[in-house]
Image (cartoon, rainbow, N blue to C red):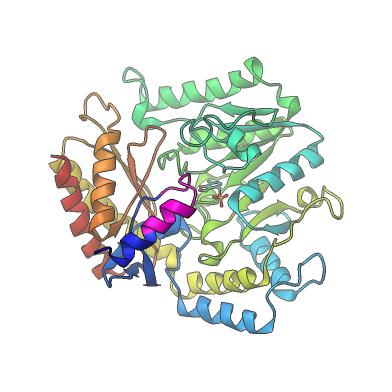
Amino acid sequence: MMTMRDRIQTKRDEYVTRAISNGNRNIAMKAKGATIIDIEGKEWIDFAAGIGILNVGHSHPKVVAAIKSQVDKFIHPGFNVMMYENYIKLAEKLSTLIPVSYKAGVGLFNTGAEAVENAVKMARKYTKRNGVVSFTRGFHGRTNLTMGMTSKVNPYKKGFGPFAGELYQAPYPYMYRKPANLSKEAYIDSVISDFKDFFIATVSPKEVACVVMEPVQGEGGFIIPPKRFVEEVYEFCKENGILFIADEIQTGFGRTGSMFAIEQFNVEPDLMLLSKSIAAGLPLSAVAGRHEVVNAPGPGELGGTFSGSPVACEAALAVLEVIEEENLVERAETVGRKMEDKLKELQNKHAFAGDIRRLGAMVAIELVEDKESKKPNAEATTTIAQYANESGLLLLTAGIYSNVIRFLAPLVITDKELTKGFQILEEAFQQVE
Ligand SMILES: Cc1ncc(COP(=O)(O)O)c(C=O)c1O
């Protein structure tokens, strides 16, 4: 007899585009903190958090209360039709929260890709230049413009061109895969030099409106750049009138052990892109940054029907309170350290467990055929992710070679949930041997 799960999966296969991935074939019924319960009553430890959108956890009571109270008042008059105050409150909060010394302003949108698109519009209008520079292995979204800015060909770009014009991808360091004959410092020097040459060989800096950088590359495999590289890129931007935009869509709101990752890199971005964990699961994004840049486009030149939904704004205001009240920025370091310790154990046991990378609770392990060759091991990665996703642990992969397991557990995860998740992770690693 068909189970309810099979029946729903059959309907999904019939009516839902197969292009949307189906990594876990179980069906959510209820969720709290870092645990999801499926329709068969099975518990799932969530190390994915809807791809990093739930730093405060599933259905945090404070967020649920905020959403309910807003829905009782009104749902969406359209900010450009009749304004409401929580949009403005959130804009004020974000303006003071971002780590900058200048006067800031904010525009609210729905998705990460939409924030990127609108930041590019602002940057082009402000600088009167067209060029947009992102980085190799970067990810900025799935719309036409952001696909062009994104690096990984399969599944994000192949067959979806032509892409928008004036988009360029500059080199970004990957310490684990540096040439063996170069010291760390010599490798950083070489990437900085390649970055500067790029503006001789590929595009004139005078024609570039903005450089868009993830302070830690997310989909690219949680690649943490050396501070010196980020600082040099920033200085180069300043010298050449190019806006430096930090895409903090995946790294934001406490994930990396600071409210925003860029705080750990000693630079002051001109614009910041925020989304994902901003509203604990409701669609919301923001462009926050220099007042004169966010105001470069004129009235009516930016917007969108659902942009800055009051329900999402109310959720975001609650999220910011929860992060502060529950010390989630500090908690990120504790959660991250526990994950790193577990991964180090696994690394000692398994020849295929390569590089461990971590900034706060943004943690990843790169899987290889062996530690000497460092040949990417996508097969082991799939085996581990599949086992976990059938056995009670939601686990995500990443990386340009699809050989990275990334950990984005809610920052409110309990020690009990962590221990349970680690047990399944350990079993998953054993499946490869
Ligand atoms: C760094 C970064 N930028 C942009 C995006 C696109 O966000 P969205 O999927 O909400 O459009 C993502 C999504 O994963 C991201 O990680």
The foreground one among 110 and 415 is: 110
Q: Is residue 332 above or below residue 272?
A: below
Q: Position of residue 136 (x, y in %)?
A: 51, 30
- Residue placed at 70% from the left, 79% from the top? 74
Picture quadrant where residue 390 is located? bottom left
Q: Position of residue 132 (x, y in %)?
A: 67, 33
Q: Position of residue 119 (x, y in %)?
A: 70, 46
Q: Which quadrant holds the N terminus?
A: bottom left
Assess whether residue 102 is covered by the magenta stretch: no
Q: Position of residue 198 (x, y in %)?
A: 60, 20
Q: Which quadrant holds the C terminus?
A: top left
Assess whether residue 15 is covered by the magenta stretch: yes
Is 106 placed left or right of 168 in the picture?
A: right
- The segment highlighted magenta reads 9-21
Is 156 placed left or right of 335 in the picture?
A: right
- Residue placed at 65% from the left, 16% from the top? 200
- Residue placed at 18% from the left, 52% from the top? 426
- Residue placed at 46% from the left, 63% from the top? 54
Could you tell me if residue 271 is visible in this image? yes
Picture quadrant where residue 109 is located? bottom right
Is 321 placed left or right of 373 in the picture?
A: right
Residue farthest toward the right in the current orientation of the protein = 299
Is 27 placed left or right of 210 in the picture?
A: left
Residue farthest toward the front in the current orientation of the protein = 1
Could you tell me if residue 257 is visible in this image? no
